[in-house]
Image (cartoon, rainbow, N blue to C red):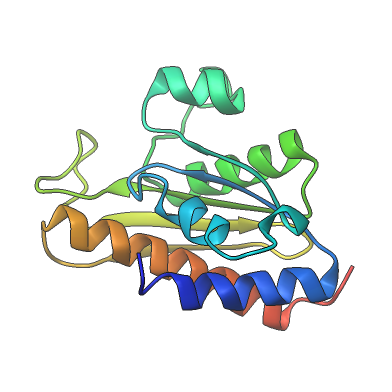
Amino acid sequence: MQTLIPLAEDVARKLKARGETVAIAESSAGGLIAAALLAVPGASAYFLGGAVVYTRQARSALVGITDAEMQGLRSSSEPYAALLARTTRHRHGATWGLSETGAAGPSGNRYGDAAGHTCIAVAGPVERVLTLETGHGDRAVNMRAFAANALETFAEVLETAKRI
């Protein structure tokens, strides 16, 4: 967690300076993204909410993505990560949505993705989606890597995005 806090502080500083907010939906990072952002004092100025969307039931109950909306999509993919970020942003009324979905390990997921695979999406005035492959199956290390990459990506987007 300690390695994530400086990344979260960077994001927090940028969001506060811009007067913007974020909502989080993560899966295989297990809440580390939200925890890091909430560890920064003054988080209520920018953090609207978050969820660990780990199952189909959670996807429906926590973010309201229906099976119909999932038609042609699969979890742990860039299109799903984008949908998750957009939906989370909309449901919370946030400036930004940040999502992560993948396979932490020690084995891959049922979709054929290897352990260490995740997709990260930022949705807002600017959107970015990417895939990260760590190449190993250490679950805890992957979870931290997924959260760090999500925070780094979000910080980069905030740095380059025009203020709304």
Q: Residue 59 location, x and y as percent?
A: 49, 26
Residue at figure coordinates x 20%, y 33% from the top left: 110
Residue at the bottom extreme of this rendering: 160
Name the foreground residue: 92 vs 132: 92
Q: In the image shown, does 129 or 53 lie closer to the viewer? A: 53
Residue sitting nearer the eye, 6 or 145: 6
Residue drawn where x is 54% and y is 18% of the image: 61
Image quarter (top left, top right, bottom left or bottom right) of the N terminus: bottom left
Quadrant holding the C terminus: bottom right
Q: Position of residue 117 (x, y in %)?
A: 27, 56
**Residue at 80 percent of width and 41 percent of height:** 93
Q: Is residue 42 left or right of residue 93?
A: left
Q: Examine the rendered structure and indicate whether residue 18 appears above or below residue 94.
A: below
Residue 164 seen by the camera? yes
Q: Position of residue 25 (x, y in %)?
A: 53, 43
> Residue 55: horizontal and vertical position, in percent?
37, 25
Image check: 45 left or right of 64?
Answer: right
Examine the rendered structure and indicate whether residue 97 appears above or below residue 133: above
